[in-house]
Amino acid sequence: MRIVSIIMFLLLLLSVAVQYNDPDPFTWAIIYAFGAAITWPAIRGRYTVWALAGLIAYTFGFFYWMPNEMVEHPSNLFLDLRMHEKGVEEVREDIGLLICAVWMLVLTVMWWRTRNKIATEPVPQMDQITGKAE
């Protein structure tokens, strides 16, 4: 899971970096930076409840910013970096939100699993005479 977290962290940072020529760069840089900030602790095996907040926010954003019109030639979305037709940027942004939402779902599941595991582990008892854990 650590390698996947590192890859996603780097991809999210790359997404922040390429927003310089976007019409609304600060909005999208913040959106991707939030995902990177949630991913950083996951690299070290620590998962936070903020992943759940990210899941909710990215899912809401995905449906809120969903374009009204889809592109006529879907191959233009991935095979060519130019904006040949109206809606290409909006669809790409929406796909970015979907990717972030799926990643936050993965981090939320990991947080939930580790949260329950920590809560159910027995606390080691100390021996009163020797001071060592039993």
Image: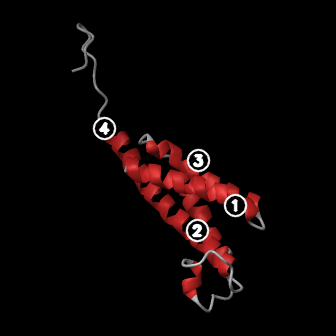
Q: Residue at x 54, y 79 (%)?
A: 79
Please determine whether, in this image, residue 41 is positioned above or below residue 102.
above
Q: Residues within 10 Å of mark 3 (few under 14, many from 20)?
A: some
Residue 112 appearing in the image: no
Q: CA distance from mark 1 to mark 2?
A: 12 Å
Q: Amino acid at mark 2?
A: Gly
Residue on which disc 4 sits: 121
Residue on which disc 2 sits: 96
Which one is earlier in the sequence, the residue at label 2 or at label 4?
2
Which one is earlier in the sequence, the residue at label 1 or at label 2?
1
Q: CA distance from mark 2 to mark 3?
A: 16 Å
Please determine whether, in this image, residue 71 is positioned above or below residue 58.
below
Q: Element under label 3? A: helix
State which mark lies toward you, 2 or 4: 2
Which one is earlier in the sequence, the residue at label 2 or at label 3?
3
> Residue 131: x, y in percent?
27, 10
Which one is earlier in the sequence, the residue at label 4 or at label 3?
3
State which mark lies toward you, 4 or 3: 3
Q: Amino acid at mark 3?
A: Ala
Q: CA distance from mark 2 to mark 4?
A: 38 Å
Q: CA distance from mark 1 to mark 3?
A: 17 Å
Q: Residue at x 50, y 42 (%)?
A: 41
Point out the image quarter for the C terminus: top left
For residue 3, side relative to residue 127 (left or right): right
